[in-house]
Image: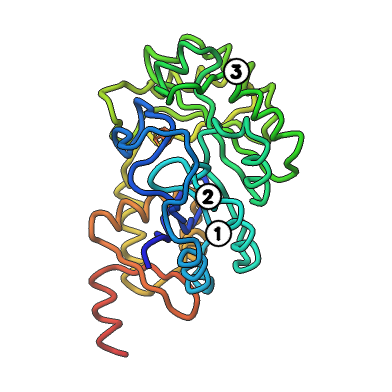
Amino acid sequence: MGYLFGPVLSRRLGLSMGVDLLKYKTCNLDCVYCELGRTACLTSCRDRFVPRQKVIKEIELKRAEPFDHLTFAGSGEPTLSIDLGEIVAQAKKIVDSPVAVITNSTLLSSPSVRKEVSAADVVLPSLDAAGENAFRDINRPASGLKAADMIAGLKDFRKEFSGEIWLEVMLVRGINDKEAEAIARAAESTEPDRIQLNTVVRTPAEPVEPLSEEEMRRMLEIFPGAELIPDWDWSVPKRVRDRLMQLLNSRECTLEEISLDQDLETGDVIKYCKILEKDGLIARRLLGGKLLFHAVDGFADDASRE
Ligand code: SF4
């Protein structure tokens, strides 16, 4: 055990069961904003990092757990694993939920990598630069990688892949925000289904700065039709917190039940549960194939009645 993690609460993917095919932290980029810290192993060589059969076995063991996506992500760049295609293909046969791959897009210039990634249902690639200078400054690539190849790979991937592509663009103050128009043109040229704009909201590898909420809203004029995904307000309003705690003190609920009962968007429920869980006010348990959330105190009462 130890290759799957979660399910984590993800604003983009809902309840996301992660699959990690790498050793911490293996990547062909060393992005200044990376929330995993500096890249320990900067390499573009594909390799086997974990035992394939053990990963597949673990996916089989977790198949009955509730999750919205089985997501290949984790300790670096998933396409560096030579087993990615085989494991994604096997996973598709094992789980009912859609399979997602998060990638930094660099290896999509390779036809064989594109074929492997195409086995997924949803692919979430990144594109933070249109030119080589910004690519070097924000992504600090392993030698030999070029922004132009990455963009060409994304275009080729679009032609070959009929599933959903949700392209993420990370904007960092003073590094790539000045070439936002060029990035927008490059992003549109790759014809993704969605463009999702992000900025630095989690602890980055380097002391880089995010764009403000107002600046990000202005970016929507440069990236028409894009969505904003960062969450500047990482808090639960008191009124919502009180109502949620009251509900979860009285009974255990799934995310959907909380959403219906409280008339809240699923994305907000995910955010609030993440915060309350981190604060130790609510906890989760798996029961009858459902992921249930409960107030920590309320659950003690329920447990004593069972
Ligand atoms: S590609 Fe992803 S894992 Fe690699 S350094 Fe950038 S943010 Fe971190």
Q: Position of residue 83 (x, y in %)?
A: 54, 53
> Mark 2 to mark 3: distance in Å?
28 Å
Q: Residues within 10 Å of mark 1 (few under 14, many from 20)?
A: some
Identify the residue at image location x=34%, y=69%.
294
The answer to whether mark 2 and mark 1 are in CB contact below 8 A is yes
Q: Position of residue 209 (x, y in %)?
A: 31, 21
Task: Decide which of tag 2 and tag 1 comes sooner along the chain.
Answer: 2
Determine whether the beta carbon of the residue marked 2 sits less than 8 angstroms from the nearest atom of ligand 1. no
In the structure shown, which secondary structural element does the residue marked by tag 1 occupy? Answer: loop
Q: Quadrant of the N terminus?
A: bottom left
**Scheme of colours in the image:** rainbow
> Mark 2 to mark 1: distance in Å?
7 Å
Q: Residues within 10 Å of mark 3 (few under 14, many from 20)?
A: some
Q: Position of residue 127 (x, y in %)?
A: 54, 26
29 is higher (above) or lower (below) than 62: above
Is any part of residue 269 visible from this angle?
no
Name the mark nearer the viewer: 1 or 3.
3
Q: Which mark is residue 13?
A: 2
Figure label count: 3
Q: Please give the residue where the numbered disc 3 appears in the rendered image.
A: 148
Is any part of residue 137 visible from this angle?
yes
Location of residue 106 by image quarter: top right
Q: Residue type at mark 2: give it.
A: Leu
Q: Please give the residue where the numbered disc 1 appears in the rendered image.
A: 68
Q: Nearer the viewer, residue 244 or 277?
A: 277
Q: Position of residue 182 (x, y in %)?
A: 58, 12
71 is higher (above) or lower (below) than 132: below
Q: Residues within 10 Å of mark 2 (few under 14, many from 20)?
A: some
